[in-house]
Amino acid sequence: MNDTLYDKSLKIENSKIDNLEVTLEQFSDLTLLGRVILSFLNAENLDNKIDRKTKLAYKIFSKDNEIGKVEFNHLIKHKRTIKKYMEYQSYINQAYEIVRLDNIVNYHRYIDMIEDTYWDIVASLCQENNIDPNIDKARIDFVQKNSDEIFDSIFQKLLSYVKKDINIQNTYKENKERAITIILVKAFIDCNILENPNGGNI
């Protein structure tokens, strides 16, 4: 049976992970992701209030003949994911604020890590399919056709980072996976991953 796009992506990423030598800088990035997850879980436990106004703050879904980012990227499976977890952005914002106040450079490194993960996955998959990722139209067409699978691949990559972080090894797997999903929804909203309908680039 032929591998799906997701299978190919997972093989690419697993081969990279297996051969990875964790440098001090890389370890710091992994720890940053773990810290965001722990801060998010703590914020959620301390405050049961959900920020329901978040939905109105972003043009994520198509409205009044204006295409939203979800529709632009042709998300189907993860359209529901975005709808479900948009309301939890206040907790992620709290977690980000903790990292930002502690060290603004580390905060920007964390955001760069999320964006770089997206670009690395897209570039690898484009090259596997003989597509130049630097040509906007070709890349965007590819992302639109495979957006749900790309979202899944980013999730798996971040999960592989978390597995290396000894600081959150005692956190339940379900909590880590849910936190990563919500982090990705935040990244989608902030245009750190997938394509922006206002110009195409993230």
Image (cartoon, grey):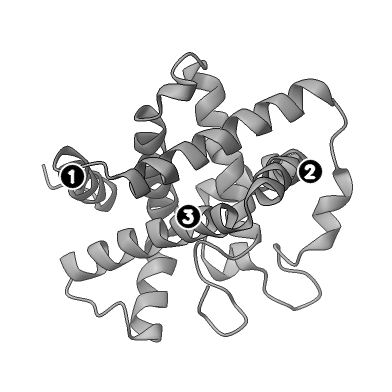
Q: Position of residue 109 (x, y in %)?
A: 50, 57
* Residue in the image at 75% along x and 78% along y: 65
Residue 140 drawn above or below residue 97 = below
Q: Quadrant of residue 146?
A: bottom left
Q: In the structure shown, which secondary structural element does the residue marked by tag 2 occupy?
A: helix
Of marks 2 and 3, which one's residue comes earlier in the chain?
2
Which amino acid, by three-letter code, is at mark 2?
Ser
- Residue 113 lies in what quarter of the image? bottom left
Picture coordinates of residue 151, whole percent (x, y): 44, 51
Mark 2 residue crowding within 10 angstroms, few (<14) / some (14–19) / many (20+): many
Residue 114 — which label? 3
- Residue most extreme to the left: 1
Mark 2 vs mark 3, CA separation in Å: 19 Å
Q: Residue at label 2?
A: 90
**Amino acid at pointer 3:** Ile
Q: Tell me if residue 64 comes above or below residue 93 in the rendering.
A: below
Amino acid marked by disc 1:
Lys
Disc 1 crowd, CA 10 A, few/some/many (<14, 14-19, 20+): few
